[in-house]
Image (cartoon, rainbow, N blue to C red):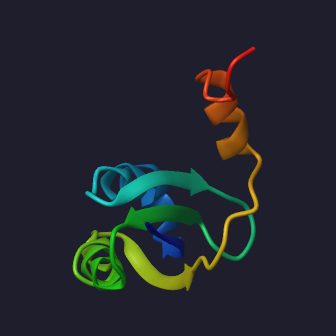
Amino acid sequence: MITAIVFVKADVARIPAVAEQIAALAGVSEVYSVTGHIDLIAMVRVRAHEDVASVVADRLNKVDGVLSTETHIAFRSYSTHDLEATFSLGLDGPA
């Protein structure tokens, strides 16, 4: 699984609509409205590197109201969230 973090600058007057359109794209798992120099962060999770280009360049960048994007590919995840989810499913072995 390839995870890409996409920083999105959007037309300020259209941020909610842009976020909803991006969230509806296949391969986009979450979209966050954020403070700072960017307006949105989209999490893209796909099977292959080529699919990142398909999601970001071919679809996300073409959403009306997207002004620019900056894409970062994740090498490794250090989140404990995934571990906690596994244990909550009972996959931690016999008691």
Q: Quadrant of residue 93?
A: top right
In this view, 68 is above or below 65:
below
In this view, 50 is above or below 8:
below
Residue in front for this viewpoint, 18 or 60: 60
Is 2 displayed left or right of 87 in the figure?
A: left
Total marks in image: 0
Q: Position of residue 20 (x, y in %)?
A: 37, 48
In this view, 94 is above or below 2:
above
Residue at 43% across, 52% down: 29
> In which quadrant is the N terminus drawn?
bottom left
Q: Quadrant of residue 33?
A: bottom right
Is 66 displayed left or right of 3 in the figure?
A: left
Residue at 52% across, 83% down: 71
Q: Position of residue 58 (x, y in %)?
A: 22, 81
Residue at 43% across, 81% down: 67
Q: Quadrant of residue 78?
A: bottom right
Residue in front for this viewpoint, 60 or 27: 27
Extreme residue toward the top, this view: 95
Q: Position of residue 42 (x, y in %)?
A: 50, 63
Extreme residue toward the front, this view: 94
> In which quadrant is the C terminus drawn?
top right
Residue in front for this viewpoint, 63 or 55: 55
Is 73 displayed left or right of 17 in the figure?
A: right
Residue in front for this viewpoint, 34 or 73: 73
Q: Position of residue 45 (x, y in %)?
A: 42, 63
In this view, 91 is above or below 37:
above
